[in-house]
């Protein structure tokens, strides 16, 4: 089955340190990959996406993600973490099913940035 | 403007009630979605509408009934729900068009959600 996986339930990082949130995918063909962030009691906010082109994608709030086809990964990164980055992060993939696109999400990774 | 508006923000309903969740977008998007999210879990797709027609129903129980009155509005009608249906219901939209294989990976945008409690 086509899917995305987030192997870490939680990531802890000290403020000011670089952070990485991992995502791997299992998709046939060229994947369309996304990262979203969810703050408590809120909807999902779009951070960035990979469609084609440069493997390093830059997004909102200083986040970036690196697409690696050989490792089937799309890890989210930020050079210097902020306490305000603490939230739930979801990786997602767009799939085509019966002529309709749908978006499937990974299990989520809770990021805690410690002051 | 990437706004998807959902009402109400909170809804408490009894198991015999009939209620509706509403969603509106004015981005000209032709695909609209309903997702269900339990606490600390990923959103789970329920329905997809493309060009105001139901394209995907992820085997959702019939006590949930979606409706797309026009290209900007999406409703979710609720009837005879169970306590386990309590969750955050998220509406979303995207530019994706059903069957358009040239579509270039458009972004899906979410509303803030409607918190549903079934008592």
Image (cartoon, rainbow, N blue to C red):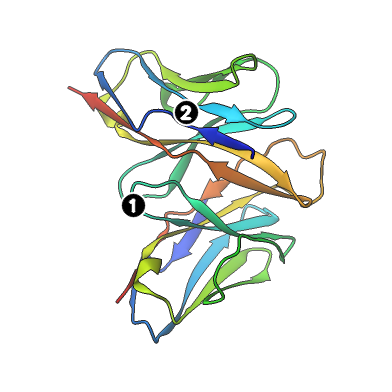
Percent coordinates x, y for residue B109 in the rendering? 55, 47
Identity of the residue drawn at 59% across and 57% down: B33
Identity of the residue drawn at 56% across and 66% down: B60
Same chain for labels 2 and 1? Say yes or no: no
Of the numbered discs in the image, which one, if any, rests on residue A60?
Answer: 2
Percent coordinates x, y for residue A59 in the rendering? 51, 25
**In the image, is residue B83 above or below residue B105?**
below
Distance Cα–Cα, label 2 vs label 1: 25 Å
Report the chain holding disc 1: B
Front residue (pair A109, A81): A109
Percent coordinates x, y for residue A63 in the rendering? 45, 22
**In the image, is residue B70 above or below residue A14?**
below
Report the chain holding disc 2: A
| In this rendering, the label closer to the viewer, 2 or 1 | 1
Residue B116 seen in render: no
Q: Residue furthest bottom?
A: B16
The residue where tag 1 is placed is: B39
Of the numbered discs in the image, which one, if any, rests on residue B47?
Answer: none
Front residue (pair B17, B106): B17
Front residue (pair B74, A88): A88
Badge 2: how crowded within 10 Å, few (<14), some, or many (20+)? few
Percent coordinates x, y for residue A81 in the rendering? 31, 19
Left or right of A84? Residue A96 is right
Badge 1: how crowded within 10 Å, few (<14), some, or many (20+)? few
Left or right of A53? Residue A76 is left
Quarter occupied by the C terminus of chain B: bottom left
């Amino acid at each position: 089955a086509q899917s995305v996986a987030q192997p870490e339930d939680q990531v802890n990082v000290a403020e000011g340190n670089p952070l990485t949130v991992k995502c791997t995918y299992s998709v046939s063909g060229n994947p369309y990959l996304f990262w979203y962030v969810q703050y408590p009691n809120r909807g999902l906010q779009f951070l960035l996406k990979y469609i084609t082109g440069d493997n390093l994608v830059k997004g909102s709030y200083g986040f970036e993600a690196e697409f690696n086809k050989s490792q089937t990964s799309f890890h989210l990164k930020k050079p210097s973490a902020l306490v305000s980055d603490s939230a739930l992060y979801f990786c997602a993939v767009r799939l085509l099913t019966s002529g309709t696109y749908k978006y499937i999400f990974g299990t989520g990774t809770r990021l805690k940035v410690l002051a | 403007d990437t706004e998807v508006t959902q009402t109400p923000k909170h809804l408490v309903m009894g198991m015999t009630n009939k209620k509706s969740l509403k969603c509106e977008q004015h981005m000209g998007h032709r695909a609209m979605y309903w997702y269900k999210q339990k606490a600390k879990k990923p959103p789970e797709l329920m329905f997809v509408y493309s060009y105001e027609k139901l394209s995907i129903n992820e085997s959702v129980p019939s006590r949930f009934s979606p409706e797309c009155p026009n290209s900007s509005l999406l409703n979710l009608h609720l009837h005879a729900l169970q306590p386990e249906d309590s969750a955050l219901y998220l509406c979303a939209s995207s530019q994706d068009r059903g069957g358009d294989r040239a579509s270039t990976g458009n972004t899906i945008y979410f509303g803030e959600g409607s918190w549903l409690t079934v008592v």
